[in-house]
Image (cartoon, grey):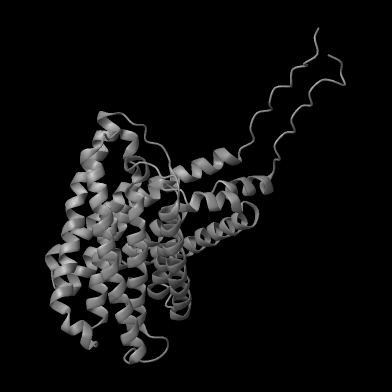
Amino acid sequence: MTAAQAPATPPAPPRGPAAAIDRAASGLLPAYFSLVMATGIVSLAAWTVGVDMLGPWCGHFARGLFWLNLVFFAALWALTLLRVARHRARLLADVSDHNRGVGFFTAVPAACVLGTQTLLIADSPGAAWALWGLGAFLWVLITYTVFTALTVKAVKPALADGLSGGWLVSIVATQSVSVLAAQLASAGLGAAPAGPAHDAMLFLALVLWLGGAMLYVWIISLIFYRYTFFPFKPSDLSPPYWINMGAMAISTLAGATLLLSGRDSSLIVELTPFIKGATLLFWATATWWIPMLVILGVWRHIIKKFPLRYDPLYWGAVFPLGMYAVATTRMARALNLPVLLPLPRGFLFVALAAWTLTLAGLIHRLVRGLSPSPNPPAPRDPRPK
């Protein structure tokens, strides 16, 4: 073989910060907005639970997480928009994927949880309204795009391969829009909260709360069927299964927020006994899931020795822990159950520890990804000796 006939050496992949950012955008996991969800709910747990228990420093910590969350939110949207512009084919393929498509729902609670932080911690109702508008728009867009794509898809996976706890993020998304709507109804926008707009927002929050609860019944029935009637490997127990609990925890928070924000609404007052009963039912269901998920986690990592290493999906496990703390606190106030208040205080520390460990894993992943790789070996000369 002559030098002219020798195959050309493939070009080296581009390097540098711009290339690294482009690769990150290309392979961005749709569920990565759970980073914002987890950081936001730990911040809110510190704000609503920790300040009374640990003092003012906990409020400063919550504010610090709020500013950090703004950075996370902006960075993820920058990567998402870059993905839309440069890697649209991969993004559209994710939309119709039964495992990755439901991850797009994390963008909705990310916006709404950040909106709650903006309202409660930053005291900026105007920005909170803007984030609620973004979350509501994304909820409509993602709900009817993803579920339509999965419905009309010609080739579909088997139930055991296509269904996971990540599907319950659709409930979390629905309830997050409900929670922030009820909070904004009581906060107003520089005006008295009572009035037609107040009642309309509360009605919307109520409808979303009920719709999200019904959606949970449909999906959790399939997940429980998957649990008990199909073979279950350690790799099947991915971190999003903690959303089994988290979806009920945020449903609890939505019901409690309706009760606390709707004291001036005739509709909410008339439905108060029903809302109280349903809220307590959701909290009991969330509480039931906690020991079950812990046992399955022990089975996965200790008995079956499945490796415990960083996975972006672990942010979806941090969020339910913080949400349980916030939801229990709000329900205890709405239902006048002070006996429950020690429980969220313990979960605050658990959520904070889980968030810290997951953040350490993310930082390690980023540092390892940005560190220069060793020089590749020189290509072998293909010409015969």
Image side of residue 210 versus residue 37, left or right = left
Outermost residue toward the front? 154
Instruction: Looking at the picture, tell me which residue is in the foreground, 109 or 15.
Output: 109
Q: Quadrant of the C terminus?
A: top right
Whether residue 72 can be seen here: yes
Query: Image point 79% across, 26% down: which residue?
Result: 8
Question: What residue is rendered at 16% in x and 79% in y?
Answer: 272
Q: Is residue 10 above or below residue 370?
A: above
Side of 380 where 237 appears, left or right: left
x%, y% of residue 210? 26, 70
- Name the residue furthest top: 385
Image location (x, y in percent) of residue 145: 46, 61
The image shows residue 228, relative to residue 266, as above or below, that is above
Q: Is residue 148 above or below residue 241?
A: below
Q: Which of the two residues, 212 or 258, is positioned nearer the viewer here?
A: 212
Q: Which quarter shows the N terminus?
A: top right
Q: Return the residue nearer the eye: 223 or 248.
A: 223
Q: Quadrant of residue 191?
A: bottom left
- Figure disc tally: 0
Residue 383 in the image, given as x and y percentages of width and height: 81, 13
Residue 12: quarter of image: top right
